Image: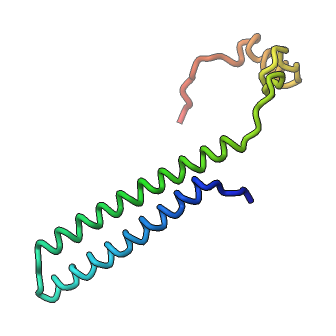
């Protein structure tokens, strides 16, 4: 398991606080809606509860993005540096290996049995 950096731990704490605020805002909104169902409608309280809930949701989204950024930075810092002499696999300048399948495909093209033209299929 990877060691968490102080930046990642701080971002996790901010996310947890934002989630707690969202939970509190959602419960307040549910209480105001419940009161409206029982006939104690207060439009101002409902507006405030909805706005508070939206703000809390935005804080959670921001905290998640920040945590993702911190994780990616931590992973970038812990990744080993690529060596300058290493080559990528499959990126050689050598021609492809001649296999029986490749020879067969070349024969199909040369004899005209395989073309780029699309022929309609009879239904």
Write the residue at 87% across / 20% down: 97
Question: Residue 39 placed where, x, y %?
Answer: 11, 87
Q: Residue furthest bottom?
A: 38
Is residue 70 shown left or right of residue 104?
Answer: left
Q: What residue is rendered at 71% in x and 57% in y? A: 3
Q: Residue furthest front?
A: 6
Residue 116 in picture, x, y percent from top left: 62, 17
- 6 lies above or below 20: above
Scheme of image coloration: rainbow
- Of 51 and 108, nearer the camera is 51
Image quadrant assignment for residue 4: bottom right
Marks counted in the figure total: 0
Q: Is 8 left or right of 106, judged from the image as shown?
A: left
| Viewer-side residue, 118 vs 36 | 36
Residue 70 x/y as whole percent: 56, 49
- In which image quadrant can residue 59 be found? bottom left
Quadrant of the snapshot with the N terminus: bottom right
Vertical order, 75 against 48 (above or below): above
The residue at 47%/61% (across/down) is: 14
């Amino acid at each position: 398991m990877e060691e968490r950096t102080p930046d990642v731990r701080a971002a996790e704490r901010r996310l947890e606080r934002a989630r707690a605020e969202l939970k509190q805002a959602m419960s307040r909104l549910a209480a105001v809606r419940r009161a409206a169902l029982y006939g104690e409608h207060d439009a101002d309280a409902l507006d405030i509860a909805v706005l508070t809930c939206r703000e809390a949701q935005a804080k959670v989204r921001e905290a998640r993005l920040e945590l993702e950024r911190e994780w990616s930075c931590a992973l970038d810092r812990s990744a080993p540096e690529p060596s300058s002499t290493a080559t990528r696999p499959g990126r050689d300048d050598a021609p492809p290996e001649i296999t029986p399948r490749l020879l067969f495909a070349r024969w199909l093209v040369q004899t005209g049995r395989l073309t780029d033209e699309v022929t309609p299929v009879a239904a």
